[in-house]
Image: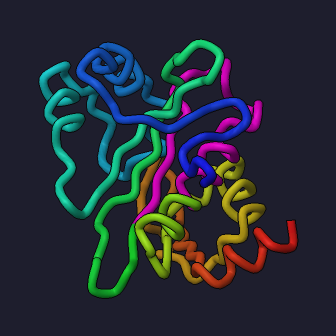
């Protein structure tokens, strides 16, 4: 039986209270947070982060992205807002360690969480949103087979400019076809 949460260079695991210090650091990185959240930038306290780690009810999965060689935490992925009756969930990812960007870890983590979502959770659809200025994420999502399904035009204002928020979706059948084609 294959391991869904293990890739070549990394694995996905639960988040622990010991991870809070690093997650607080990432929450204080304004550039990173403005890629992830439409809310105005606000660093989180250690208590807020610990509450978030301990949260996540039956309709969400938050998993740490850790390097195999050292178990070092470099980011996290989350499937949330799962509508079990419809087998649909929202997906998000963050690579918090800047020196780990551009090394393929985001792609590998996404491949693991997508396999988990479709094979273990039996979801039919994954969806995500991304801001129009996050070009690197858009390239990743499209290369993984996500289809742009629409845009929330001029959804948010950053630095005096309006930006769209795009909606992307991937169906289990599309994922299976891409996986078989290699």
Q: Residue at x 50, y 58 (%)?
A: 116
Vertically, is 162 above or below 11?
Answer: below
Say if the magenta span includes residue 94: yes
Q: Residue at x 14, y 34 (%)?
A: 51
Q: Position of residue 57 (x, y in %)?
A: 17, 55
Vertically, is 103 above or below 130?
Answer: above
Q: How many marks?
A: 0
Q: Position of residue 155 (x, y in %)?
A: 43, 67
Q: Residue at x 38, y 16 (%)?
A: 22
Vertically, is 161 above or below 17?
Answer: below
- The answer to whether residue 71 shows anywhere in this view is yes
- Left or right for 59, reference 67: left
Say if the magenta span includes residue 50: no
Q: Nearer the viewer, residue 16 or 78?
A: 16
- Left or right for 113, reference 146: left
Q: Which residues are magenta?
A: 90-114
Vertically, is 181 above or below 71?
Answer: below
Dividing the image into 4 quarters, which one contains the N terminus? bottom right
Dividing the image into 4 quarters, which one contains the C terminus? bottom right
Residue 173, quarter of the rendered image? bottom right
């Amino acid at each position: 039986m294959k391991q869904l949460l293990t890739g070549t260079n990394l694995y996905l695991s639960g988040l622990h209270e010991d991870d809070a210090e690093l997650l607080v650091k990432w929450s204080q990185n304004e550039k990173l947070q403005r890629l992830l959240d439409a809310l105005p930038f606000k660093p989180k306290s250690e208590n807020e982060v610990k509450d978030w780690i301990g949260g996540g009810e039956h309709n969400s999965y938050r998993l740490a992205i850790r390097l195999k060689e050292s178990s070092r935490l470099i980011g996290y992925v989350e499937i949330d807002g799962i509508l079990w009756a419809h087998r649909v969930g929202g997906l998000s990812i963050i690579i918090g360690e800047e020196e780990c960007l551009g090394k393929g870890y985001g792609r590998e983590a996404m491949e693991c969480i997508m396999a988990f979502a479709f094979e273990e959770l039996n979801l039919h659809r994954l969806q995500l949103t991304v801001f129009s200025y996050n070009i690197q994420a858009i390239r990743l999502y499209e290369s993984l087979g996500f289809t742009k399904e629409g845009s929330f035009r001029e959804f948010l204002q950053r630095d005096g400019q309006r930006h769209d928020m795009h909606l992307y979706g991937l169906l289990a059948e599309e994922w299976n076809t891409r996986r078989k084609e290699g």
